[in-house]
């Protein structure tokens, strides 16, 4: 996360209220799948919480973004040190596809596709109703996926909040008002 990410790292609006973002990650599939579904690994890049790995399975995810990197960077005043959200598994095809409900902003799907020895992860977040939320969601997914990529590659990511703030400013210019 040092320097400016390439254009390909940015999410795009595939519909007016849908963000799609992709990352090419080192394989194998099972490792990337574990980072999506296992609480101990997921908490290193996004949020902790056990998932009942069955269609309809309930879960609660808890974000502690200050703990993702050391140092964490400057947390914006509008965010607290912890945030939790409940959801359910809506699609499940291990280790290729996971769909979940996601609070009031709609569903999120994770698709994994082989790219040689790598895995292409596509995250699609649907029904993000307003631009302010879309900016937060875009910067959030981008920053969290950058941390996941660093963790999988065995490198140390930079301060989460500083990266998130820079990404939010960049998405301000990329997402139409």
Image (cartoon, rainbow, N blue to C red):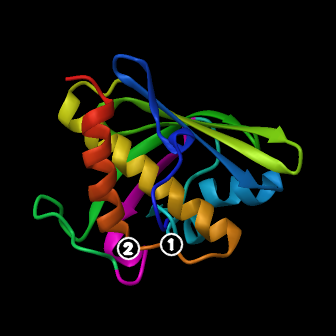
Q: Residue furthest right?
A: 116
Q: Secondary structure at mark 1?
A: loop
Kindly report the distance in space between the C-alpha atoms of the residues bearing marks 2 and 1.
Answer: 7 Å
Compare residues 160 and 169 and report the one nearer the observer: 169
Query: Left of 163 or right of it: where is 11?
Result: right
The kind of secondary structure element at disc 2 is loop
- Name the residue: 26% across, 57% down: 165
Q: Taking 36 as reference, is 68 left or right? A: left
Pick the front one: 175 or 51: 175
Q: Is residue 122 magenta?
A: no
Q: Quadrant of residue 161?
A: bottom left
Q: Does residue 154 show up?
A: yes
Residue 16 drawn above or below residue 40: above
- The residue that disc 1 covers is 157
Q: What number of labels is visible?
A: 2
- At a point 64% along the width and 60% down the height, the residue shown is 35
44 relative position to 62: left or right? right
In this rendered view, identify the residue nearer to me: 172 or 38: 172
> Which stretch did the figure color magenta?
56-71
Q: Which mark is residue 114?
A: none
Residue 154: x and y in percent read 68, 75
Q: Position of residue 92 (x, y in %)?
A: 67, 36
In the image, farthest residue toward the bottom: 70
Q: Does the stretch in magenta take in 67?
A: yes
Q: Is residue 38 visible?
A: no
Residue 87, given in percent of the width and then of the height, sits at 42, 43
Q: Residue at x 35, y 47 (%)?
A: 139
Provide the residue designation for mark 2: 159
């Amino acid at each position: 996360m040092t320097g400016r990410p390439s254009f390909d790292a940015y999410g795009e609006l595939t519909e007016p209220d849908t963000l799609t973002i992709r990352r090419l990650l080192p394989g194998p599939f099972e490792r990337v799948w574990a980072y999506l579904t296992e609480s101990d690994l997921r908490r290193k890049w996004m949020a902790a919480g056990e998932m009942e790995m069955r269609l309809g399975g309930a879960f609660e995810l808890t974000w502690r973004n200050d703990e993702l990197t050391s140092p964490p960077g400057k947390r914006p005043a509008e965010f607290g040190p912890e945030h939790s959200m409940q959801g359910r598994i809506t699609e499940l095809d291990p280790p290729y596809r996971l769909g979940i409900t996601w609070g009031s902003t709609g569903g999120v799907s994770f698709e994994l596709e082989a790219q040689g020895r790598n895995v292409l992860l596509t995250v699609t977040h649907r029904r993000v109703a307003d631009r302010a939320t879309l900016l937060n969601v875009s910067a959030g997914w981008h920053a969290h996926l950058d941390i996941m990529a660093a963790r999988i590659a065995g490198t140390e990511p930079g301060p989460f909040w500083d990266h998130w703030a820079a990404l939010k400013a960049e998405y301000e210019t990329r997402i139409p008002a």
